Amino acid sequence: MLKIILSVLLSLTLLLGGLAQPAWAGDAANGAKIFSGKCASCHLGGNNVVNPQKTLKKDVLESFGMLSEAAIITQVTNGKAAMPKFLGQLTDSEIEDVADYVLAQAEKGWQS
């Protein structure tokens, strides 16, 4: 019985530990390089020089329904308003990497 209880506790610990850290499919380190070259001119430090109300900060992304890899991938791919589309300029993998970088930075509060 003790083995069963310990096994259940271990499983729950692993499950809950996995939920604490978001798992993204892309490479955030590569995304940082791409972001620096393609995005930082408008979004340095998670800000937005064109529309200061729509930053890349976690609470703002969440309030606009953008706090997900899929939403950021769509935005980067297709652009919107003043933001250009990067379809054709970046590969799908590079766009995924940028999305993962943005999400990771948003989680950290855009601190290095």
Image (spheres, rainbow, N blue to C red):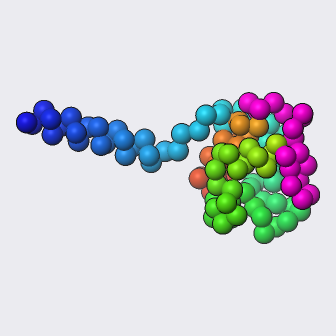
Tell which of 52 and 85 is nearer to you: 85
Task: Please name the residue shown 17% across and 37% down the image.
Answer: 6
Hey, which quadrant is residue 15 in on the image?
top left
Residue 46 appears in view: yes
Give x and y (percent) for residue 96. 71, 37
Tell which of 50 and 93 is nearer to you: 93
Question: Is residue 19 shown left or right of residue 81?
Answer: left
Q: Main secondary structure of the magenta part?
A: loop
Hey, which quadrant is residue 13 in on the image?
top left
Instruction: Please tell me whether residue 39 belongs to the stretch shown in magenta.
Output: no
Whether 5 is drawn above or below 44: the answer is above
Q: Which residues are magenta?
A: 78-94
Task: Please name the residue shown 7% across and 36% down the image.
Answer: 1
Give x and y (percent) for residue 40. 83, 48
All told, the count of numbered labels is 0
Residue 41 appears in view: no
Tell which of 39 and 68 is nearer to you: 68
